C-alpha cells in the first residue's frame, strides 16, 4: 500500500509542477541558473569518466578478441556500440543520479525543513512548479548533450589508450568505429537520455519536496532518492530496450 501511496503522491506533485507558471520571466531566469548548476557543472566528471571507461573498454575488447581469426577492427566497433547503446546513456544516468539527484533532494529538502516552501505557499506561489519545473526542464535539456560528450570522449579515450598500450593501431580503431554504423542507435539512446533525465530530476525532487523532520531526514531522503532513481533507471532501460530495439 505504501508503494501505491508514493506513486499517487508523485503524480499529484507532477500535476502541480506542470501547472501554468505565474510569471514566465521568473521561470526562464531560474531555468538558466539550473542549466548551469545541474548541467554545465557536470561536464567535467562526464568527460573524465568517459575517457577512462573508453580506455578500459578498448583494453578489455582487445584482450577478449586476442585471436588471429578476429579482425582488430572489432575493438573499435565493440567500444563504439557499447558507448552508444549502454554506457553513455544508462551508466551515465546512474552516475548523474548520484551527483544531480542528491543535489536536488538536499536543496529542496532543506527548503522544506527551513519552511521556505511554506512561505512560498503563503505568498500564493505554486512552490512545486517554481522550484521543481526549472530543474526538470534543465536536466532533460542538458542530458542529450552530456550523452554526446560522453560518446565522443569515450571514443577519444579508447583511441589514445589503444595506441599507448599497443593493443590496436589508430587505423584499425578508426576503421572499427566507422564499420557497420547504425544511426538509429544514436536516436534510441537519446530517447533513453530524455526519459532518464526526467527521472533523475523528478524522483529526487519528490523525495525532497515531501521530506519531514530536520537535517538528518534530509540526508536519509537523499539516499532513498538516489537508490530509487537508480532502480527506476534500470527498469525503464529494460522497457525501452525491449520496445525500441525489438
Image (spheres, rainbow, N blue to C red):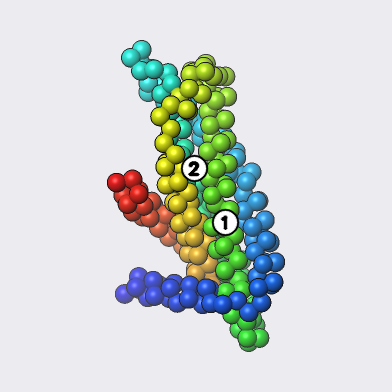
Task: Name the residue tied to disc 1.
Answer: 141
State whether residue 217 appears in this view. Answer: no
The foreground one among 99 and 24 is 24
* Left or right, residue 203 beside residue 36: left
Q: Position of residue 94 (x, y in %)?
A: 47, 50
Task: Name the residue tied to disc 2.
Answer: 88
* Left or right, residue 196 beside residue 135: left
State whether residue 122 appears in this view. Answer: yes
* Mark 1, secondary structure of its residue: helix
Few, some or many residues within 10 Å of mark 1 (<14, 14–19, 20+): some
Q: Are marks 2 and 1 in contact (CB under 8 Å)?
A: no
Quadrant for the N terminus in the image: bottom left
Q: Position of residue 128 (x, y in %)?
A: 56, 75
Residue shown at 38%/55% (left/top)? 236
The foreground one among 181 and 78 is 181
Residue shown at 65%/73% (left/top)? 24
Residue shown at 57%/74% (left/top)? 129
Mark 2–mark 1 Cα distance, whole angstroms, equals 16 Å
Q: How many marks?
A: 2
Q: Position of residue 61 (x, y in %)?
A: 42, 26
Amino acid at each position: 500500500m505504501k508503494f501505491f501511496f508514493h506513486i499517487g503522491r508523485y503524480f499529484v506533485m507532477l500535476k502541480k509542477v506542470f501547472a501554468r507558471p505565474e510569471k514566465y520571466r521568473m521561470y526562464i531566469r531560474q531555468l538558466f541558473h539550473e542549466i548551469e548548476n545541474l548541467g554545465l557543472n557536470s561536464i567535467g566528471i562526464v568527460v573524465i569518466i568517459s575517457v577512462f571507461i573508453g580506455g578500459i573498454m578498448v583494453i578489455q575488447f582487445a584482450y577478449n578478441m586476442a585471436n588471429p581469426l578476429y579482425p582488430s577492427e572489432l575493438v573499435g566497433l565493440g567500444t563504439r556500440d557499447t558507448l552508444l547503446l549502454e554506457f553513455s546513456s544508462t551508466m551515465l544516468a546512474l552516475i548523474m543520479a548520484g551527483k544531480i539527484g542528491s543535489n536536488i533532494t538536499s536543496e529542496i529538502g532543506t527548503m522544506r525543513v527551513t519552511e521556505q516552501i511554506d512561505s512560498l505557499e503563503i505568498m500564493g506561489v505554486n512552490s512545486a512548479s517554481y522550484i521543481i519545473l526549472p530543474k526538470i526542464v534543465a536536466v532533460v535539456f542538458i542530458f542529450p548533450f552530456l550523452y554526446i560528450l560522453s560518446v565522443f570522449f569515450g571514443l577519444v579515450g579508447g583511441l589514445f589508450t589503444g595506441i599507448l598500450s599497443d593493443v590496436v593501431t589508430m587505423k584499425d580503431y578508426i576503421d572499427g568505429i566507422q564499420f557497420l554504423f547504425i544511426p538509429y542507435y544514436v536516436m534510441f539512446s537519446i530517447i533513453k537520455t530524455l526519459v532518464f533525465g526526467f527521472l533523475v530530476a523528478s524522483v529526487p525532487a519528490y523525495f525532497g519536496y515531501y521530506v519531514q523532520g530536520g537535517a538528518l531526514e534530509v540526508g536519509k531522503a537523499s539516499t532513498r532518492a538516489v537508490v530509487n532513481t537508480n532502480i527506476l533507471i534500470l527498469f525503464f532501460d529494460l522497457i525501452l530496450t525491449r520496445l525500441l530495439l525489438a
